[in-house]
Image (spheres, coloured by chain):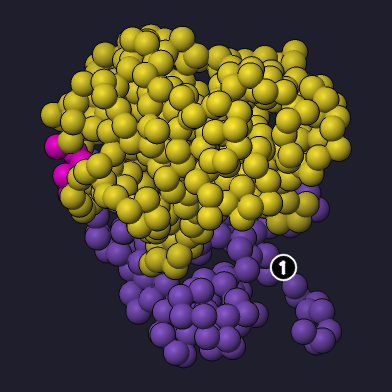
Chain colours: A purple, B yellow
Amino acid sequence: MSAAPSTTSALPKAAVPFLKIPEHGEPYLEGHRCSACKEVFMEARRACPKCTKIGTLKPEKLANTGKLYNFTVVHRNFPGVKVPFISAIVDLDGGGSLKGNLVDIEPDMSKLKFDMPVKVVFRDAGRQDKAGNKYLAYFFIPA
Amino acid sequence: MTNVYVVGTDMIKFGRFPERTVDDLGAEAALLALADCGLTIADMQAVYCGNLFQASAAVGQRVLKQIGQTGVPVVNTANACATGATAFREGWMAIKAGVYDLVLAVGVEQMGKGLLGGGGGKDDGIPTEGLLGSGTMPSVFAHVGLEHSRKYGTTFEQFAKVSVKNHHHSTLNPKAMYRVETPLEEVMNAEMISYPNTKLMCSVNVDGSAAAVLCSEKKAKELGLMSRAVKVRASALASDPWSKHNLAAMDFNPVTQIAAKTAYEMAGLGPDDIDLVELHDCFATAEIVHYENLGLCKDGDAGRMIDTGETALGGRIPVNVSGGLLSKGHPLGATGIANIYEITTHLRCEAGERQVEGARIGLTHVVGAGSACAVHVLEKV
């Protein structure tokens, strides 16, 4: 963007490129739908990974609701990463699949069900980069 | 096109050798494989070297500086956990094409301890491990296992039984890193890493090397090497095709199915003709899904297969009698060629206590994140 930097500023950065933070309005996940095969991908690509058509991927705002396709409770991770946590793979309603943390529910396998409905929420990542910038991340919560 | 044979092969006992170098480890296996067929590096027309962690550092050439700089072409391969198998396959292809009669394939890796995957040394931005799910290998393969549970109801106990079996097999293999029985309760009660993978259901990061000498039919006959030769009936490599959850979660199933189908077609046989299998049990969950991906049973039958002991030594189709990656160890670049060594050893009836009786045809499989899958079918001559 060539617009002058905002003087009010203070928008956090996005933890991943497909998390969009508009200056006005709510953050959202952006996917790219192939106009030929209709599949949705989280990131832009030169051609469709599924059908190989070139230039058919168009950005699209994705749903904030979906279903829990897969999950695991992670008990051991790198130093500094808080465990246990739930690593979840979610199919968004209307298209798009992505991995993220499922929160606001006990990290206990017996509490988790395949296909349980979830919502996408946007919260502070709790991590900063070397320059001290704050980041916004997406999380899944039980719907 | 000529038939291609493995005429010499060997591996070092896998272990932890922090005081040694990658080239020294690779050189040891290379010399062992050459000695196995009574040849020397001077007989080799090309060298194919698989190594992942030093992929930019001319490992194959460094091996030759340890065992003889003959000036032959050296090709270094890096292809995730299919690195060693890819080096082997490149050698096979060169002989098939009629370019060479004798080549050496070496796979070698020096590993640290600890978790693989999920890292992110980005200069800008923040690490996303543990923030946006988990990309560590135990977590990735936890998702692989639970996808099987989702479809077929596969249980924690069934996954754990894979580890019990392969640890048992390793007690019969003098070249395995660990040679310790692990009863089911011990496997299930070990530290949970990513459910359902406990620590004893994760492969062992070890240092190791393995090598194979590949030869054309004409040359093998000329050199009198046919009596212990093993024919490469098929060599197949695949990359991951598009599948719905591949980009979010890594899907190792279709890539394996493609490589297996290609290999069976090339070999002109099917899963029922296979007498033993060395497959990529990087985690206990992985072995279960690959029973189906390789066609060893029908879809949904893998849990029953591990329950009934069909894949244990003495069973209908023994899998990972070497101890597998879970107990023999998994030095990434060496693993694919170590599998070739294991199958060849059985087809030569030289596997000692763990010998699969009457083995005539064996299959090797490796699959690495990214993804790359190699399947080879070997046959007793």
Total number of numbered discs in the rendering:
1
Are there few (<14), some (14-19), or many (20+) residues within 10 Å of tag 1? few
Determine which quarter of the picture holds residue A38: bottom left
Left or right: where A11 falls relative to A108: right
Q: Is residue A141 in view?
A: no
Q: Quadrant of the C terminus of chain A?
A: bottom left
Check residue B302 for magenta coloring. Answer: yes
Left or right: where A111 falls relative to B307: right
The residue shown at (19%, 26%) is: B315
Q: Quadrant of the N terminus of chain A?
A: bottom right
Determine which quarter of the picture holds residue B114: top right
The residue shown at (72%, 23%) is: B40
Image location of residue A14, percent across then percent down:
63, 65
Check residue B145 for magenta coloring. Answer: no
The residue shown at (59%, 76%) is: A44
Specify start and end residues of the magenta stretch as a single range: B300-304
Establish if B273 lies above or below A37.
Answer: above
Q: Considering depth in this image, is B299 or A85 the residue closer to the camera?
A: B299
Image location of residue B272, percent across then percent down:
22, 43
Image location of residue B285, percent across then percent down:
33, 38
Left or right: where A112 falls relative to A104: left
- In which chain is the residue bearing label 1? A
Q: Is residue B171 in view?
A: yes
Amino acid type at mark 1:
Ala
Establish if B144 lies above or below B29.
Answer: below
* Magenta highlight: main SS: helix
Read off the residue under disc 1.
A10
Image location of residue A11, percent across then percent down:
68, 69
The residue shown at (73%, 51%) is: B122
Q: Secondary structure at mark 1?
A: loop
